[in-house]
Every structure is written in structure tokens, then in C-alpha cells.
Image: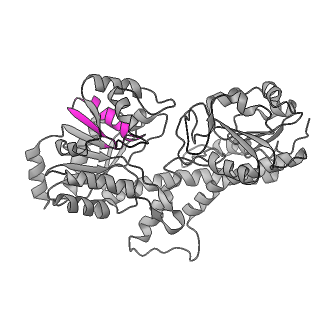
Amino acid sequence: MTNKLSSILEKRGPIKKIGVLGMGYVGIPAAALFADSEKFDLVLGFQRDSPSSGYKIEMLNKGDSPLKGEEPGLEDLLRKVVDANKFECTPDFSRISEVDAVALAIQTPFLDPASLQPDFSALIEGIRNVGKYLKEGMLVVLESTITPGTTDTLARQILEEESGLKAGEDFALAHAPERVMVGRLLKNIQEHDRIVGGIDDNSTKRAVELYSPVLTKGQIIPMTATAAEVTKTAENTFRDLQIAAINQLALYCEAMGINVYDVRAGIDSLKGEGITRAVLYPGAGVGGHCLTKDTYHLERGVTTSNGDLDYPENTDSLFVLARKVNDFMPDHMYYLTREALKRIGKDVRGSKVAILGWAFINDSDDARNPPSEPYRNLLIENGAEVMVHDPHVLNYPEVEIMKNIDEVIENADVVAVLTGHSDYFKLDPAYLRSLTEKKNTVIVDGRNVLDPDAFIGNGFVYKGIGRGDKNKHPII
């Protein structure tokens, strides 16, 4: 079987034309970098002409990035490859038949984490579109984060059904998960090592050929498709676990009346041979598309593998417990808000709360699964008036995002920082007090961007994640 595919790939020749399905945070920079490589002649970006995202097609074909926030180098690179006629965005999926390789960068959220049910509807639609126009000798790569086992089962089955071809015999199939962070998309793709896992050796080799030209510092790490799937889900699960550890420590420090950042600095100071430690930072919650659901992909992978898992009975996995801790942090922000209001004889009901930051990550417009949302929901459910400011997020379903920060803070009883945008580090307590026109205004810092003493000195009632040393300060 592998000899047949090897012969077909040799006859087809090197990869020259590439298709990328999904013009988002992963697909756009990947397509731009492929197009900028001398190894490739043309990259087609495939985007549905839908009411919600069809606008991207015209923007991209002008060399404009639809991604907002700070994304160094992306728009310049897009203009370069568009001007060179090496990149084109199209809603015509029949043009998949023109390419030698196609990568799918489509979101894979979870419908119900409790029952480990993912929402693969968008991914399945994308795979079906590829299958309809799949030709002999093409390479199909899933970049989406998926449940371990998906490439060699669900994806293979759909592609074979739609095309009438056989994976590993007539076409190559692999998983090469994205490893990018918003705000450094191009840099991450070029410099991070690339995990590449095919369903067989020929598929792996063909995928290595696809990704090698866009790497600068990064190296290719080949493995099986399932191992690649586990690698991606596990690395995000481990990061989520690290965040949960420092979040739980922050809660402990609050209870014991000490500063978690002092403790963190102390832990991080121990260095030497044999000591490996990555101490992250606590905060108001974990958001984004990846960390909020990749744990569940990993959990689902082991439950559907039919393997013999030996683990303590009736016990949450360490990874699921970490998810619960991180999901709890917006609730804790609400608790801090409520307790601070009590200190000045007020209740959540009837109070005006100014939320600063809707994006889940600083200096970005990425507002997927933001911790600000459950915090806002709790406030509204308990009778608060809520206004939201974010300098980067343009809109969000059923939430008005204001651009005038003064208007949001004016007459507020509570100012809550949910995102560490650069602008918020510059907040002046005296000016904020003049806007609120209150003798005492609550300030809740979920990202450690404010100087507690400066705000306390200006009459604010301060609460901060992990700031047990300040959370019960005398009110001035």
C-alpha cells in the first residue's frame, strides 16, 4: 500500500500549490507564510461567503488583515504575497482540486464538556469539502486541535467516502497541530518546533515537505498522527494545569493574608541543576479557544481508545480538576466584587460595574470564551448595571463594547480589570476617582496591573487576585 502512494507522490512531484481552509487566527498567518516561500507557487485561502465572515474575502484579497489587535508583521506580509500574486482568498471550494496539499485550520469547540461531546460540525463540513474535490496524490493535513484518534478514523472515513480514494494508498493524510499564540502568530509558526504526524511514513514525509520551508528556528518533530494529536492536546492541558496551580495558590494566599506574587518570586528564585519549574501567573480566568477545551479532547481520546486505563476510582482526573479551578476564577472575581461592596455598605444589586477588558488576552481582539463573560453574567443576574470597555474588541454577540473608557467608568461603583491591556497599566487613580465621583469606589484587579497603595490612598476599596496582603486594607 505504501509503495503505491510513494509512486503516486513521486509522479506528482514537489508541492507547489497549497490550499488553507479557515481564514482565522491560524489559517491566515499560515497561508501568508506558505505564500511567501520560494518553494511554493500559489496559496489559496478558502473562506465561506457567510454573513458573519464573508467580509474577510475582500479584505484578504486587498492585503488587509481582518484580525485586529497587535499582530506584528502580518499585514505587511499579506500585502506582499497579494501583490506578488501568490495568495488569493476564495469562497469557491471546487478550486481545492487545483492544489497539491490542503491544510484545515477550523475551530473545534465542545458542545458539552461533562459528556465529552465535541462540536465537530464545522470541521466535518471542511473535511467533506476537501473530500469532494480530492485528487490522487494530494496531501490533506488537519491543523485543528482534535480528539486523539480523529485523523485516522473520522477524517479518513469522510475523505474516503467523499472521494472514492484510499488514504495511505491514493492520498496522504496527516495531523500537524498549530502551536500559535495571538499577538505573535507569524513568529510562533516560524520559530516553534512543528509536530508532524502522518497515518503512515509516506504521509509524514509529505507533510514534512509542506512545513519545512516556513520554519526559521523551529525544527520538524515527526511521529504518528495519534501521537501528534495527543501532543497538542496534552501541551495545552499542561499549561492549563500550571495556571490552575498558581490560581489555587493565589486563593490560598488570599485566605492567609499574604501576597501571592511574593510567594511566586520566592518559588521562582530556586534555580540549579535538576530543577525544572515554570511558574505562571494567576488571574481572573482562562479564556480563548484552546485551553478551555483541549483538556476535554484529551479526556475523550482516552475514553474512546478502548485502552485499559488504570486510575483512582471515582476521581476527577488532575486535568479536569484544573479546568474546574480555572473556570472558577470569574466566580471568584464576583466574590471579591461583592465583598468589597459590602465593606462600604453597598450591594451588587443596583451598583454600576465598569468591566475593563473583554478580550481573553492582552492587547488583542481575541474574545473567544473570555472570562469577562461569566463575570458579567453573574453581575447582571444579581441586579448590577454593567458597562464594558475594550480598546481592541470591536463587537461581541449581545454585548455592547464601549471605546470611551471615561464613559464606562463615569459614576461607577466598581471598576474591574479583567484583561491586562497595556492601556490599563496607565490608569490614574485620582482621575478615575474624579470620573466615579464617589468617596469610595471598588477596584477589583484581576490581572495585577494596578498599584494597590496608589488606589487605596485615593479612597478606593481594593481587591486583587492573590493579594491577601491588601484585600482587607483600612478604607481611606
Q: Is residue 377 visible?
A: yes
**Image point (17%, 42%), residue name:** 98
Please tell me whether residue 246 is drawn above or below residue 461 in the rendered image.
below
Asked whether, in this view, residue 68 is left or right of residue 219, the answer is right
Please tell me which residue lies in front, 459 or 367. 367
Please tell me which residue lies in front, 214 or 275. 214
x and y, in percent, of residue 450 in the image? 73, 33
Please tell me whether residue 303 is drawn above or below residue 100 in the rendered image.
below
**Image point (13%, 62%), residue name:** 1
**Image point (23%, 42%), residue name:** 209
Q: Is residue 228 visible?
A: no
**Image point (19%, 42%), residue name:** 99
x and y, in percent, of residue 103 in the image? 29, 46
Looking at the picture, the colour scheme in use is one colour
- Among the 4 quarters of the image, the one containing residue 265: top right
x and y, in percent, of residue 337 in the image? 78, 47
- Among the 4 quarters of the image, the one containing residue 35: top left
Asked whether, in this view, residue 371 is left or right of residue 87, the answer is right
Q: Quadrant of the C terminus?
A: top right
Please tell me which residue lies in front, 172 or 69. 69
Assess whether residue 244 is covered by the magenta stretch.
Answer: no
Image mark count: 0
Please tell me which residue lies in front, 369 or 472. 369
Asked whether, in this view, residue 220 is left or right of residue 167, the answer is right
x and y, in percent, of residue 18 in the image? 24, 40
Query: What's the magenta region?
Result: 21-48
